[in-house]
Amino acid sequence: MNRKAFLTLLAALLVLGGAGLALFWQDLSSWRSADAKIGAKLFDKLPVNDVAQIHLKDGKGEATLAIKGQRWVVKERSDYNANVQDIGDLLVKLPDLKVVQTENVGASLFPRLDLVDPAKAGKGGDNAGTMLELSDKNRKLLGSLLLGKKVIKTEDSPLPIKPQTPVGRYVLVPGSQNVLVVSDALTSAEARPERWLAKDFFKVERIKALTASGGAQWKIARREEYGQWKFAGGGGELDPSAAVAAVNALAALAFTDIAPEVKADSFNDPRTYTVETFDDLTYTIRLAKKPGGDDYYLTVAISGEPPRQRRPEKGEKPEDKARLDKQFAEDLKKLDERVKGEKSLAPWTYVVAGKTLEPLLKDRAQLVAATKPPASKR
């Protein structure tokens, strides 16, 4: 090799080395700009109070939580109220989210960690991560993060199946190819709208009479709040346990989702339950089987107003009047607040698990007490 060829090769090596060094510093700069050093907080400067929208998207769906007026709503559920407790918990966690581990893996391994951008995932959303985006009231992006697989810790246990606890999560910061593990699994950050719904529901108490019509025809009633339930008409003796189960079901109902596109007037073979209470309230509940499963659609409407005046108790002493009047006023205030919230539920159709409705779905024959066999003669 002559001197000229040697110098040419040396110059080429210097150029390549310089390019490699530039790429190294560029990669390092990207790492630093993503605050990816162990112990760093990814959302340390997040203006939490400015967050007005949270958007979560994975390979199967999306959930958009936004401030509308003075309340948080779920956009995919026609602006139904969102669970502010869950939103608050997420927003509190994000500024303290720390990097606890870094993984030097190539993009070809991202699918194994469920870190494929959902916008680029294939049909079915396989291996897609969950894109979390936070915006202000003007929809200006304040921060984003791609959430991948959860890091699971297996606990020591004498049991054959060891308990497992999510302790972290693989993530990607947009603009960086460095896989990080953060200090919280962010289990609530799911792109399922039903996950974020406020689950406050009506609770029927102090029931005086319950009437079923539609799929079943029966009515049970009692004269006093703690009196015995009886059929309001027809033959047969009411099974007390069946009556109590039906009444208790109305005090413990919960819904799993909202069906904004379904209206009560479109129900197939609906059942109607009319509930009268000792507080002069009437609940009208309509049910219909949801196609393709065991769940039911449900709507509720509430009418009436609680009594404004207390009825003196039998044998009430004058010295007890002030105390009882005060207790009545406090209870009335709580009841008014509850009824106000329950009446706001009327415009919506709810999805309720059929299992929780089973005590109400019985026909009249199933509510009749079993006939005891006659005593044998000796």
Image (tube, rainbow, N blue to C red):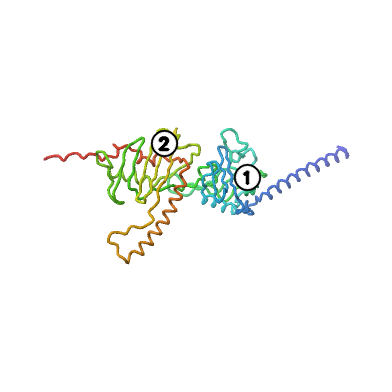
Identify the element where label 1 is drawn. strand
Classify 215 as above or below 157: above
Can the viewer see residue 189?
yes
Q: In the image, residue 174 lies at what x, y percent? A: 65, 44
Q: What residue type is labelled 1?
A: Leu
Q: Which mark is in front, 1 or 2?
A: 2
Residue 172: mark in rendering: 1
The answer to whether residue 204 is left or right of residue 142 is left
Q: Earlier in the sequence, mark 1 or mark 2?
A: 1
Residue 15: mark in rendering: none
Q: Residue at x 33, y 57 (%)?
A: 311
Q: In the image, residue 238 lies at what x, y percent? A: 27, 42
Crowd class of label 2 (few under 14; some 14 to 19; many from 20; radius 10 Å): many
Q: Which amino acid does label 2 sit on?
A: Ala
Identify the element where label 2 is drawn. strand
Quarter of image, res 301 = top left
> What quarter of the picture does the N terminus occupy?
top right
- The residue indicated by pointer 2 is 288
Report how far apart the C-alphas of labels 1 and 2 lie in the structure: 45 Å
The answer to whether residue 314 is left or right of residue 145 is left
Q: Which residue is drawn at 33% across and 64% down?
A: 320
In this view, the residue in front, 237 or 26, is 237
Quarter of image, res 122 = top right
